[in-house]
Amino acid sequence: MKFDPSGWLSGVRRIASPNFDARPVQTSVSLLVIHSISLPPDEFGGPGVRHLFTNTLDCGAHPYYAQLAGVRVSAHFLIGRDGGITQFVPCGSRAWHAGVSVWQGRERCNDFSIGIELEGCDSMPFESAQYAALSRLTRRLRRKYPIRHIVGHADIAPGRKTDPGPTFDWALYFRLLDRSSA
């Protein structure tokens, strides 16, 4: 897997989202934000997330979707339950994943972060394949970008967001990262 100059990663599925814009001039990526998402909530494997990130979600297809009408969001990457990685926004651009956010006193985390969504929810464990894919992707991102911090969405938007949630095994994730760098 290699990045092209704009930040598209080879070897992963690519579905371009229209929900991105340019990072502020002279802003480097220093933060990695881990999220979780499922659409409909607590259901996996369907096209809901892909449709949300590409503005093609039929808001009448499920009762939950009505509240998403007009929402424009994206993430750089989505890791499915099977460990498959899809990229929606090139890493050189600003994806719209963090919303109102702050990390270490710095607001607008989208400006300086890369967002990775895991297909999941607060109430169910993530799959081993997702941790393996996340650790591989994180290693690749750290080689390309000066990432200094890895946090959950809840860390940058406390009180507003809970993801990746209490079932995300941070210790396992960091062990996998440490094992790969040894």
Image (spheres, helix red, strand yellow):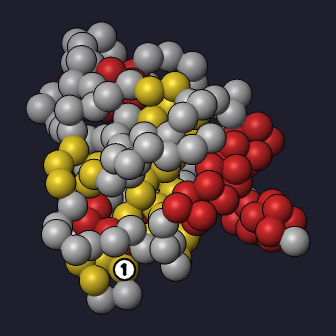
Q: Residue furthest top?
A: 61
- Which sits in the foreground, 41 or 144? 144
Q: At x 70% / y 54%, what residue is drawn?
A: 135
Residue 55 image position (x, y, % from top left): 21, 25
Q: Is residue 47 above or below residue 84?
A: above
Q: At x 36% / y 80%, what residue is drawn?
A: 103
Residue 73 image position (x, y, % from top left): 26, 41
Q: Quadrant of the N terminus?
A: top right
Q: Residue furthest bottom?
A: 105
Q: Is residue 47 above or below residue 69?
A: above
Residue 22 image position (x, y, % from top left): 18, 54
Question: Residue 173's image quarter?
Answer: bottom right
Q: Residue furthest front?
A: 5
The image shows a total of numbered marks equal to: 1
Q: At x 62% / y 55%, what residue is drawn?
A: 140
Q: Is residue 97 above or below residue 127?
A: below
Residue 124 image position (x, y, % from top left): 67, 42
The kind of secondary structure element at disc 1 is strand
Q: At x 76% / y 37%, what residue is drawn?
A: 129
Q: Quadrant of the C terminus?
A: bottom right
Question: Residue 123's image quarter?
Answer: top right
Q: Which residue is mark 1?
A: 103
Any part of residue 139 in sight = yes
Left or right? Give the position of 97 relative to 1. left
Any part of residue 126 in sight = no
- Disc 1 residue type (three-letter): Trp
Near mark 1 (Cα within 10 A), the count class, few <14, some 14-19 or many ≥20, is some
